[in-house]
């Protein structure tokens, strides 16, 4: 079964500005995401909902993609950006925490479980994930790489 891949507005803008190896690794990975769904992601984030329903893919260098799934098993590319703790304006995780209304990353041990459940399906959908996708669609980028 093929997974439909969609972008939030901010995720599309993030992908649009990629260049060189980052761009190639991103687009090669989206093909894999379409073919393999949640198996094409490295791990699921841990913490409170909706963070614990989001999955991450490490791409070229410190580039990360954050993905959620909807009821139709569509993969939503929510954010793409560097994991750079020295600059919160471009750090993909700092941007995610802000969209989730968090000042700091969720506490607790980060176990990085597989994105797919034991049934091979993506994380169960909750209303907060739909709300987060909507916030990504409405967000304006604060800065560029």
Image: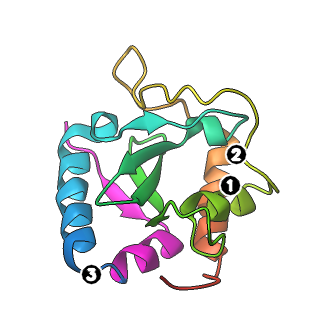
Whether residue 40 appears in magenta in the rendering, the answer is: no
Q: Is residue 3 magenta?
A: yes
> Looking at the rendering, which quadrant does residue 116 occupy?
top left
Of residue 45 and residue 139, the one placed in the foreground of this image is 45
Q: Residue at x 73, y 35 (%)?
A: 48
What range is drawn magenta here? Answer: 1-16
Res 19 label: 3
* Residue sitting at the far front: 86
Q: Position of residue 86 (x, y in %)?
A: 62, 68
**Which residue is label 2 attached to?**
128
Crowding near pointer 1: few (<14 within 10 Å), some, many (20+)?
A: some
Rendering coords of residue 97 (x, y %) = 70, 56
Q: Are marks 1 and 2 in contact (CB under 8 Å)?
A: yes
Disc 1 from disc 2: Cα separation: 5 Å
Q: Secondary structure at mark 3?
A: loop
Q: In the visual, does 123 lie left or right of 136?
A: left
Picture quadrant of residue 103: bottom right
Foreground: disc 2 or disc 3? 3
As drawn, the label of residue 131 is: 1
x and y percentages locating residue 123 in the rendered image: 50, 31
First in sequence, mark 2 or 3: give its number. 3
Q: Residue at x 74, y 41 (%)?
A: 106
**Residue drawn at point x = 66 percent, y = 69 percent:** 88
CB contact under 8 Å: marks 2 and 3: no
Instruction: Name the element at disc 1.
Output: helix
Give the percent coordinates (x, y) of residue 110: 60, 30
Of the residues tagged 1 and 3, which is closer to the observer?
A: 3
Mark 2 to mark 3: distance in Å?
A: 32 Å
Q: Residues within 10 Å of mark 3 (few under 14, many from 20)?
A: few
Vertical arrangement, residue 32 with respect to residue 7, above or below: above
């Amino acid at each position: 079964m093929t997974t439909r891949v969609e972008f939030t507005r901010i995720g599309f803008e993030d992908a649009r500005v990629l260049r060189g190896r980052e761009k190639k690794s991103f687009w090669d990975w989206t093909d894999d995401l379409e073919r393999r769904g949640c198996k094409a992601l490295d791990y699921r984030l841990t913490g409170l909902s909706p963070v614990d329903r989001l999955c991450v893919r490490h791409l070229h260098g410190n580039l990360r993609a954050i993905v959620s799934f909807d009821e139709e098993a569509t993969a939503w590319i929510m954010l793409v950006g560097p994991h750079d703790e020295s600059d919160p304006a471009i750090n993909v995780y700092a941007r995610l925490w802000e969209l989730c209304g968090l000042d700091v990353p969720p506490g607790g041990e980060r176990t990085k479980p597989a994105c797919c459940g034991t049934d091979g399906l993506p994380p169960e959908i909750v209303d907060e994930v739909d709300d987060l996708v909507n916030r990504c669609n409405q967000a304006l980028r604060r800065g560029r790489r």
